[in-house]
Image (cartoon, rainbow, N blue to C red):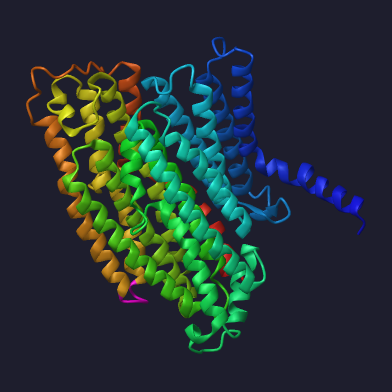
């Protein structure tokens, strides 16, 4: 094939076949360019950046919805690659595009209400926010180890700048510097792991990893895999890649950046990072785990990997809940809460790997799918309840100029709408019925319990999950006690947020969604069906190898 033919084929694949799959990302990219042009020509007073941002996020959400409807109805193939195999289009990746687009829209709405950023900095702020979201969308659709690294870095670099966006504030600058240094170290380790894995297996295509790993393991013959140098190197590569993903997920022992970054950043940015980065990283983790399973010969190694993830999940959830007890800064407290919830969600991935790599995997195919469904359902509920909690902090901060626990004392007397919204979000974070968080946790614990039939350690994981739910109750109740039961100081600044105001309506809308996802069968079953279809598409890739 001559060079001109190769270029023509590449252009044909890009323009005709690949770009329609990339429509959501293109909407966000075009929005970034439009915001910068609006600023360049001093048109931001006529077209404020938040208006452009809302329209861009809404367009990306619409494109994602159209893609999901097309795939779900059977109009398009359920799974196909594009951009010469670097990306994959299926219901799983489109689910996360829609999820991230909706969350971006909610975040832009929150920043508009709170006034962070101001009009002068809005184009820069929203450009960083949209750039990070594009990276997270790429994480969900990655089909190549090179794209895996590029997506993680594209999501990370704007996040560093967002953490330090509060100019002139030392805690913000310090948090951003720590985040950059730790992130650069994690990225270097992950890149080294990618080079080891691709070098040993001879490919970066994630759809071929399990087949090559099985060949390195001896074609499925029972042997001491750890004594094989190729398998040892591949296993080391996977563990080093996991360092980068564990950093994004703030899993113990790679959690140390999270409390400082959340405390130094604005509450709006902390809320964005607590949900969006978790969603993108979990999507990529599921992709990686699925790509390494499904071929005879890898079961022993991947089962051990699943058990290790279960152990990390237990430690992460326990540490996050215990460390939250002594926190007086609300953002720092919710940072440790985020760490704990990452541990809960990791239990679903652990259960998936244990069931998927057992000799009886065929009998558990439905439960394997349900474990991923539980993770997706949890993320959807987590989006509303965690953003709702950060929104209450951000709105109260605008009046009290503080994000400490003491600034919330007796707030029920001045702003009942903020307190009721926080109560719903907090009780859902605990996992109490009838809120959405209860059913999300129940789905994950049920999957882990079912996996216990195949490996006893998964019963330990479920026990730790239940114990940590009880542990989390104490520091969440502390927030409620401060807001509802303590007397508001006479010299405390007033927080006049009313129910019918835009701020009150926003937080109550988030709280209502949390409530509906726990009590309204139609909403619950609709989200469950959507999550189940997305889970089936990604699990299908492993079971059909």
Hey, which quadrant is residue 449 in on the image?
bottom left
Give coordinates of residue 243: x percent, y percent. 45, 60
| Residue located at (18% from left, 16% from top) | 494
Q: Is residue 188 above or below residue 99?
A: below
Q: Is residue 454 magenta?
A: yes
Question: 308 and 169: which one is in front?
Answer: 169
Q: Is residue 237 above or below residue 518?
A: below
Hey, which quadrant is residue 36 in on the image?
top right
Count the marks: 0
State whether the magenta stretch is mostly helix, strand or loop: loop
| Residue located at (46% from left, 56% from top) | 245
Q: From this viewpoint, is residue 514 visible? A: no
| Residue located at (49% from left, 22% from top) | 122
Q: From this viewpoint, is residue 451 visible? A: yes
Relative placement, left or right, of 89 versus 175 is right
The C terminus appears in which quarter of the rendering? bottom right
The N terminus appears in which quarter of the rendering? bottom right
Hey, which quadrant is residue 97 in on the image?
top right
Give coordinates of residue 361: x percent, y percent. 47, 74
Question: 525 and 114: which one is in front?
Answer: 114
Give coordinates of residue 362: x percent, y percent. 49, 74
Q: Is residue 111 magenta?
A: no
Relative placement, left or right, of 246 versus 326 is right
Residue extending furthest top?
Answer: 46
Stretch in magenta = 452-456
| Residue located at (34% from left, 64% from top) | 312
Give coordinates of residue 269: x percent, y percent. 40, 34
């Amino acid at each position: 094939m001559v060079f001109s033919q190769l270029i023509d084929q590449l252009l044909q694949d890009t323009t005709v076949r690949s770009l329609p799959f990339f429509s959501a990302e293109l909407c966000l990219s075009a929005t970034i360019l439009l915001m910068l042009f609006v600023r360049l020509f001093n048109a931001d007073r006529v077209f404020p950046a938040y208006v452009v941002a809302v329209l861009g996020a809404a367009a990306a959400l619409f494109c994602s919805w159209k893609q999901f409807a097309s795939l779900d109805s059977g109009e398009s193939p359920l799974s196909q690659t594009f951009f010469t195999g670097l990306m994959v289009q299926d219901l799983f990746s489109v689910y996360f595009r829609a999820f991230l687009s909706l969350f971006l829209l909610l975040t832009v709405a929150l920043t508009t209400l709170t006034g962070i950023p101001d009009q002068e900095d809005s184009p820069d702020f929203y450009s960083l926010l949209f750039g990070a979201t594009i990276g997270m969308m790429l994480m969900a659709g990655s089909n190549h180890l090179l794209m895996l690294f590029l997506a993680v870095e594209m999501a990370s670099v704007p996040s560093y700048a967002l953490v330090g966006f509060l100019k002139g504030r030392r805690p913000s600058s310090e948090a951003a510097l720590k985040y950059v240094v730790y992130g650069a170290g994690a990225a270097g380790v992950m890149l080294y792991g990618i080079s080891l894995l691709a070098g040993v297996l001879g490919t970066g295509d994630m759809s071929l990893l399990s087949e090559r790993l099985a060949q390195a393991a001896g074609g499925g013959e029972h042997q001491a895999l750890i004594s094989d140098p190729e398998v040892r190197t591949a296993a080391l590569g996977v563990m080093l890649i996991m360092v980068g993903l564990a950093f994004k997920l703030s899993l113990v022992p790679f959690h140390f950046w999270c409390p400082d970054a959340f405390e130094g950043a604005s509450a709006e940015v902390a809320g964005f990072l607590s949900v969006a980065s978790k969603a993108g990283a979990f999507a990529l983790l599921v992709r990686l785990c699925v790509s390494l399973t499904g071929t005879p010969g890898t079961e022993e190694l991947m089962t051990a990997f699943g058990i290790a993830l279960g152990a990390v999940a237990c430690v992460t959830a326990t540490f996050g809940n215990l460390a939250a007890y002594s926190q007086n800064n609300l953002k720092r407290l919710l940072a440790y809460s985020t760490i704990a919830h990452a541990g809960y969600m990791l239990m679903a991935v652990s259960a998936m790997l244990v069931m998927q790599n057992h000799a009886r995997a065929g009998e558990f195919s439905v439960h394997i799918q349900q474990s991923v469904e539980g993770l997706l359902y949890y993320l959807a509920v987590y989006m509303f309840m965690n953003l709702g909690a950060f929104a209450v902090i951000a709105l109260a901060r605008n009046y009290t100029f503080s994000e400490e626990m003491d600034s919330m004392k007796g707030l029920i007397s001045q702003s009942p709408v903020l307190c009721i919204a926080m109560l719903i979000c907090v009780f859902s974070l605990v996992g109490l019925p009838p809120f959405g968080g209860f059913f999300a946790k129940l789905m994950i614990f049920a999957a882990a319990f079912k996996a216990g039939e195949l490996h006893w350690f998964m019963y330990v994981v479920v026990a730790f999950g239940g114990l940590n739910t009880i542990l989390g109750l104490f520091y969440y109740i502390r927030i409620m006690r401060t807001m509802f039961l303590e007397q508001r100081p006479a010299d405390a600044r007033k927080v006049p947020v009313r129910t019918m105001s835009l701020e009150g309506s926003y937080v109550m809308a988030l709280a209502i969604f949390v409530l509906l996802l726990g009590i309204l069968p139609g909403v619950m079953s609709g989200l469950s069906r959507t999550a189940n279809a997305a889970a089936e598409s990604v699990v299908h890739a492993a079971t059909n190898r």
